[in-house]
Amino acid sequence: MRTSLATLRVFDAVAESGSIRLAAERLGRTPSAVSEKLKQFEQDIGAPLFEGGRKNRLTPVGSFVQTQVRDLLSHVDRKLATLQAYSRNAIGRIDIASVPSIAVTILPTVIARFRTQWPAVEITARDADSRSVADLVQSGTVELGIASMSGERRALSFTPLFEEPLGIVCRRDDPLYRKRSGRRWSDLIGRTVLANAISDTNTIGTLPPPAQAPIVVYNVLSLLALVRANIGITILPQLSVSELPSDVGFVPIEEADARRTVGVITRAGEALSPATAALLHIVRGALREIAGDFSITLSEDVQPERH
C-alpha cells in the first residue's frame, strides 16, 4: 500500500469540507493534486470513498475510513506534539482526560505537585463523562484517562484505582434525606430521577425505568440546579459532590451494588511516557490522602505500604 500520512490528511480534509477545492485551499495544494491523492487512496482501499464526483457525500466505506483516519491522525499529532515539546527542552507533554469528580477533587493538587518537580512539562487536561474519556484515549487524543469503564474495549486497558459509593442527591427537606433508616433502590420508586452519565454507563441496582427518568442531564452543576428547584432527585458518586449547596444533601444508598469503580484507561499495549507515568504516581498518592474523607476503597496497587 502506498498510502502516506499526507494522503490521509488529504482524505480527511476533503471528507470534512465536502469539496476538493476547499480542501486544496486548506492544505495549500492544487485541486488536481488533491484529486490525484484521493484517486490513489481509493485504489489502495479498494472501494469508492465518495458518492459521485462532487466529494460531498461519503459512501458507507468512506464513513468507516474517515473514523479510522481521524483516530490515526489524532494519535500521530499527539505524538508529534510530544516530540516537539521534548525538543524545546520541555522534557515531555501530558494529555489527560478525567471524569469531573477527579478533575475537581484531586487534579488541582496533583498538577501543582507535579509542576514543582517538572515545571517545563506541558499539560493538557480535559474533563468529560466516562464514555467520552474512553473515546478520547482510544482515538489517541489523550494518553491517559481516569474514569469508569463499562464493557470491554480491545483497544483499551483498564486498571482500577478505587471504588466509591453512589448515593441519592436531593434537597435537605426531602423525606429521603430525613429518613432515619438505610436508603434502598426501592425508595426511588415513584420518584422523578434525573438521569446522568452515571446511570448511562453503570448497571446499578434497580434504577427506575426511563418513564420515571424523563430528564437526562450530563453536567453536575445543571443537575444540582434542577435538584434545588425540586424538579427531581439524582444518583451520583460521592466524589462528584464534594461541595454541595447548603440546601442539597448526599445520602449513600445502602445496597451492595451502589458503587462504581474508577480506574486508569490507556491504549492497550502502549507504555506511558515518563512524564505521564510520574503524574499517575502523584495521582495515586493524592487518592491515599482523601480516601478516608470520601469513603472510597483503594485498589491493591494504590493501598499505602505497610511497615
Image (tube, rainbow, N blue to C red):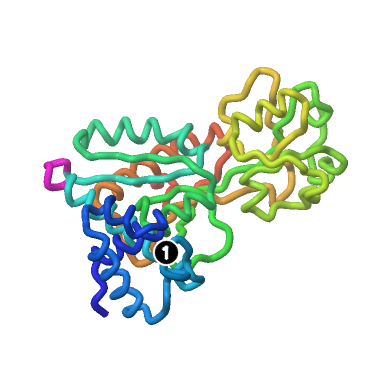
Q: Nearer the viewer, residue 86 or 292?
A: 86
Q: Quadrant of residue 155?
A: bottom left
Q: Is residue 87 magenta-colored?
A: yes
Q: Position of residue 131 (x, y in %)?
A: 54, 52
Q: Position of residue 36 (x, y in %)?
A: 26, 70
Quarter of the image with the C terminus in it: top left
Could one spot residue 154 in this view of the protein? no
Q: What residue is shown at x 77% (from left), y 43% (from top)?
A: 213
Q: Nearer the viewer, residue 202 or 242?
A: 202
Magenta extent: 86-90
26 left or right, relative to 286: left
Task: Name the element at disc 1.
Answer: loop
Q: Position of residue 4 (x, y in %)?
A: 24, 69
Residue 261 sits above or below residue 171 on the image: below
297 left or right, relative to 12: right
Q: What residue is shown at x 16% (from left), y 41% (from top)?
A: 90
Q: Which residue is mark 1?
A: 54
